[in-house]
Image (cartoon, grey):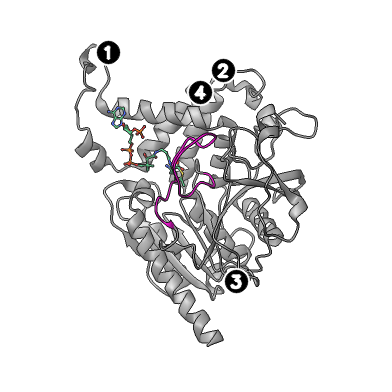
Amino acid sequence: MTLQDRHRPLTRPAYGRRPECWVPLGAGTNPDAFGLRVGSVPLETGGLLPDVVVAVQTWGTLAPDGSNAVLVEHALTGDTHVVGPPGPGQPTAGWWPGLVGPGAAIDTDRWFVVATNVLGGCRGTTGPATEAADGQPWGSRFPEVTIRDQVRVEALVADLLGIPAWALVIGGSMGGMRAAEWVATYPDRTRAAAVVAACGAATADQIAWGQAQTLAIEQDPDWRGGDYHRSGVSPDQGLGLARRIAHTTYRSAPELEERFGRSPQPGEDPMRGGRFAVESYLDHHARKLSARFDAGSYVTLTRAMATHDIGRGRGGIAKVLRRYTGDLVVAGVDSDRLFPLELSQQLAAAHGRRPAAVIESAHGHDGFLVEVDQVADLVSGQLARLASRHHRRVG
Ligand SMILES: CC(=O)SCCNC(=O)CCNC(=O)[C@H](O)C(C)(C)COP(=O)(O)OP(=O)(O)OC[C@H]1O[C@@H](n2cnc3c(N)ncnc32)[C@H](O)[C@@H]1OP(=O)(O)O
Ligand SMILES: N[C@@H](CCO)C(=O)O
């Protein structure tokens, strides 16, 4: 525990079945999030990951019967800070601005909203940069974790919070993978799910892009086989390169053409060693991510996305989805080249209840973050259906 941690007030949230499990998070994490010690977690690949702590942020009030809880799932480099400004310990503003709050689409006067940082992440939840029992960072010893493991950890969080079933699990991209996995692993604990810009199983194309990113990091000499955390130097070059590759896939080619075309970065001449504006844009995003994200987590989470398959060991995706009787909304972005709309349409067709919703955006995969008003419309409709069903039941 650092000096700064000791000075952080330990005001545990006033809910949950096991208040003794709440722990303060370390310095450099979202000050509005708390740690929840969920214990040892059995992993899909075998073995137990001991003493897992999960960063949790909440909004609103949990109903006494735990029936009004909504889980919001972040994407690859996100965190628990769904809405709100940046500040000390929280370098980024909320990634779904305006979606959660009093009177918002996920209205916190009605719903209790939970956001957890994912297993293997670096924003408060146990991951490669976390200290293991020997006081050394897990580093290369951190095990392979799957989307299914991450969802199991979230179920342990729900147990500790006193949430028997989520009213809604919603997420985009890697968060959408976890929302889909909730439907598959815990259909009875997921009354509704919104799977946005995601898929039921990673495609060859996604795995291929992920491999290039992972290799970019692993080939940085500062990676040190994954054990760089105590060296004082992190593989920022590799992580930056990974982000450039990823970010290009997150945006659409027409958008890049429209925004940047062949323009040089102002003051630079691409014919004389200078950069094109689009190169400068990618350099900017590379630098920003390297400053805020752990390379080990990036590799771990990229691998988790590659092995994502809600049908694994369950007879396939269609079989899994057909038996889901909850309210499933699947939505894709029409210009997404990484998670093409067809993947959402296939997922919706496999469920067989309603077609995939289309988020219209020029921004490609990142449309699920940029077009927050369209996500808000989807989620408002879904929550209204849930609320009216609830009223019919109790009315
Ligand atoms: C759940 C989650 O996914 S959490 C993670 C989400 N957040 C992130 O990934 C953070 C990284 N940001 C992004 O991915 C995207 O910016 C989004 C999706 C959040 C928002 O997209 P947009 O609003 O379209 O932002 P855009 O991609 O245009 O980037 C804007 C940035 O590029 C910079 N930029 C634009 N052109 C250039 C250029 N030629 N040279 C250098 N920088 C440039 C802008 O100054 C701006 O910088 P800032 O973000 O530091 O203020
Ligand atoms: N820009 C998002 C998109 C990934 O799906 C992120 O960094 O998490």
Q: Earlier in the sequence, mark 3 or mark 1?
A: 3
Magenta segment main secondary structure: loop
For marks 2 and 3, the one nearer the N-term is 3
One can see residue 337 in this view:
no
Left or right, 308 with reference to 367: right
Work out how far the residue at label 4 is from the one at label 2, CA to CA, in angstroms: 10 Å
- Residue 61 in percent (x, y) is at 58, 63
Considering the numbered disc 1 on the image, is that residue within a helix, a strand or a loop?
loop
Q: Earlier in the sequence, mark 3 or mark 4?
A: 3
Question: What's the amino acid at mark 3?
Answer: Ser
Residue range highlighted in magenta = 79-100
User: Is 380 or 129 nearer to us in this picture?
Assistant: 380
Q: Which callout, 1 or 2, points at the residue further toward the start of the chain?
A: 2
Question: Label 4: how many residues lie within 10 Å, few (<14), some (14-19) or many (20+)?
Answer: many
Q: CA distance from mark 4 to mark 1?
A: 22 Å
Image quadrant containing the N terminus:
top right
